[in-house]
């Protein structure tokens, strides 16, 4: 049985990945993971490929155990793994709760690694892993500091894993989008005691375009996908400018009305 596994499939990029993966004729099932079961069930009405609904909270280690048990029972061939589950919070260190600080690290880093390690034994040559990082991975971002650091972790892990997997023919792409306006992410990121540090989200992209480009880049076996003009330019500048200068530019940009 050929399958894809998509985490964070109950909204935003994850659900859009499921809709666009549908065009891949080789898939017998798509396994969709998130906490909101009803949302995952509703997604089935939008796609013809059979969805296996896995309502799991990935911050709970036993959730990965359930996924592992299912993989061993069904023995599928995982053609595509997309780690899209993630969240961020805007605020200074005082204004983001301890629970959220640790939660970001837990979901964006620990769970992404744990899911990848668990799924990899079920992947073969030609398999694709898309790790949904962020353009925030390319430099430190004050007032989005922990989130950006989690994405830097995921980015580095993805790049290294790609090299380790080179001889197996399994491809890893780190997807690094800029702000996206039509997902639940920005509203969620504002759920701290004070999120006024980032006033606007200019030139934000749309999930459809980000997902289309990310899937294409993964098919082309790119190590990094920057799906949009802003993140492509950002990646280049973050490579050539010192981090202190980039943070100075950010101090100006985040104040734009
Ligand atoms: N939107 C942006 O501006 C932007 C930019 C760059 C990168 N990204 C990254 O893109 C990825 C997708 O974000 P999005 O924009 O699509 O945001 P979103 O609409 O908020 O989607 C986040 C997904 O993660 C799932 N999730 C959250 N906590 C979870 C948990 N504990 N266990 C399992 N699933 C969980 C959510 O489902 P449930 O709530 O049902 O669990 C939801 O399906 C994230 O990794 C984000 O960091 C987003």
Image (cartoon, helix red, strand yellow):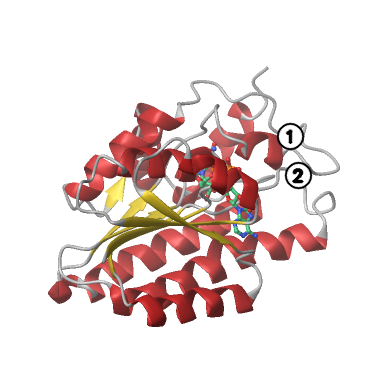
- Report x, y in % for residue 54: 54, 61
What separation in Å lies between label 1 and label 2 (alpha carbons)? 7 Å
Left or right, 124 with respect to 183, comes to left
- Residue denoted by label 1: 197
- When the figure is inspected, residue 128 is found, relative to residue 178, above or below; the finding is below
| Element assignment for label 2 | loop
Mark before the other along the chain sequence, 1 or 2? 2
Nearest the viewer among 105 and 243 is 105
Left or right, 214 with respect to 153, comes to left
- Residue denoted by label 2: 91
Mark identifier at residue 249: none
- When the figure is inspected, residue 73 is found, relative to residue 216, above or below; the finding is below
- When the figure is inspected, residue 224 is found, relative to residue 123, above or below; the finding is above
10 Å crowding of disc 1: few (<14), some (14-19), many (20+): some
10 Å crowding of disc 2: few (<14), some (14-19), many (20+): many
Nearest the viewer among 194 and 119 is 119
> Decide: marks 1, 2 in contact (CB < 8 A)?
yes
Q: To which quarter of the image does residue 80 belong? A: bottom left
Q: Residue at x 41, y 70 (%)?
A: 116
């Amino acid at each position: 049985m050929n399958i894809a596994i998509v985490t964070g499939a109950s909204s935003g990029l994850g659900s859009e990945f499921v809709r666009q993966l549908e065009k891949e004729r080789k898939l017998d099932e798509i396994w969709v993971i998130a906490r909101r079961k009803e949302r995952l069930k509703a997604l089935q009405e939008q796609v013809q490929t059979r969805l296996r609904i896995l309502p799991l909270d990935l911050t709970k280690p036993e959730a990965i155990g359930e996924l592992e048990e299912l993989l061993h029972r069904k023995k599928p061939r995982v053609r595509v793994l997309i780690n899209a589950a993630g969240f961020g919070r805007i605020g200074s260190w005082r204004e983001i709760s301890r629970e959220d600080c640790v939660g970001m690290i837990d979901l964006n880093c620990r769970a992404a690694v744990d899911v990848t390690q668990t799924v990899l034994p079920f992947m073969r040559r030609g398999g694709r892993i898309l790790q949904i990082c962020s353009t925030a991975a390319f430099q430190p971002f004050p007032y989005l500091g922990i989130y950006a650091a989690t994405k830097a972790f995921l980015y580095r892990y993805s790049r290294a894993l790609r090299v380790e997997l080179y001889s197996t023919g399994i491809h890893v792409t780190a997807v690094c989008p800029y702000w996206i306006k039509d997902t639940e992410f920005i509203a969620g990121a504002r759920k701290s005691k004070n999120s006024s540090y980032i006033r606007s989200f200019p030139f934000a992209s749309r999930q459809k375009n980000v997902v289309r480009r990310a899937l294409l880049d993964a098919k082309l076996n790119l190590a990094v996908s920057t799906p949009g003009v802003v993140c492509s330019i950002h990646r280049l500048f973050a490579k050539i400018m010192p981090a202190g200068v980039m943070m100075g530019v950010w101090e100006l940009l985040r104040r734009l009305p």
